[in-house]
Image (tube, rainbow, N blue to C red):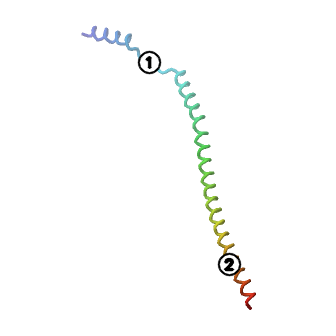
Amino acid sequence: MNDKLELLDEVESVINPKKKLDINHLVYILLSMMLVIAIVFPKIYIQQQIYFTSRDISKLKSEYDTLKEENRVINSSVESIRYKNQILDTLF
């Protein structure tokens, strides 16, 4: 029985050899991971900078629109006051 088990172990080792990781395989994996990181991280950084810049631009645009509208209202009010002032000066 023991001989059969030894024979089966030897046959299994020939049919399915155990694959060991060597140092070259480890180096290839590390280099490929570094390559992926070198490609992905700048892309993420640039996308993040674009997002924050566009958010700032959007905020400034809304402030600009608000100030433009306030300017229009103030100009309208000034014109109204001028008109009233001119009318009142001519009446009195």
**Residue, far bottom:** 92
Q: CA distance from mark 1 to mark 2?
A: 90 Å
Number of on-image labels: 2
Q: Position of residue 33 (x, y in %)?
A: 55, 31
30 relative to 40, above or below: above
User: Which residue corresponds to the image point at 58% horizontal and 31% vertical from the top-left?
Assistant: 35
Q: Which residue is mark 2?
A: 80
Q: Residues within 10 Å of mark 1 (few under 14, many from 20)?
A: few
**Residue, far left:** 1
25 relative to 40, above or below: above
Can you tell which mark lies on residue 19? 1
Where does the N terminus fall, quadrant-wise? top left
Q: Position of residue 10 (x, y in %)?
A: 35, 10
49 with respect to 26 (left or right): right
**Residue, far front:** 91
80 with respect to 3 (left or right): right
Classify residue 6 by image quadrant: top left
Q: Amino acid at mark 1?
A: Lys
Q: Earlier in the sequence, mark 1 or mark 2?
A: 1
The kind of secondary structure element at disc 1 is loop
User: Which residue corresponds to the image point at 61% horizontal and 56% vertical from the top-left?
Assistant: 58
Q: Residues within 10 Å of mark 2 (few under 14, many from 20)?
A: few
68 with respect to 31 (left or right): right
Q: Position of residue 87 (x, y in %)?
A: 72, 85
Q: Position of residue 71 (x, y in %)?
A: 67, 69
User: Which residue corresponds to the image point at 64% horizontal and 69% vertical from the top-left?
Assistant: 70
The kind of secondary structure element at disc 2 is helix
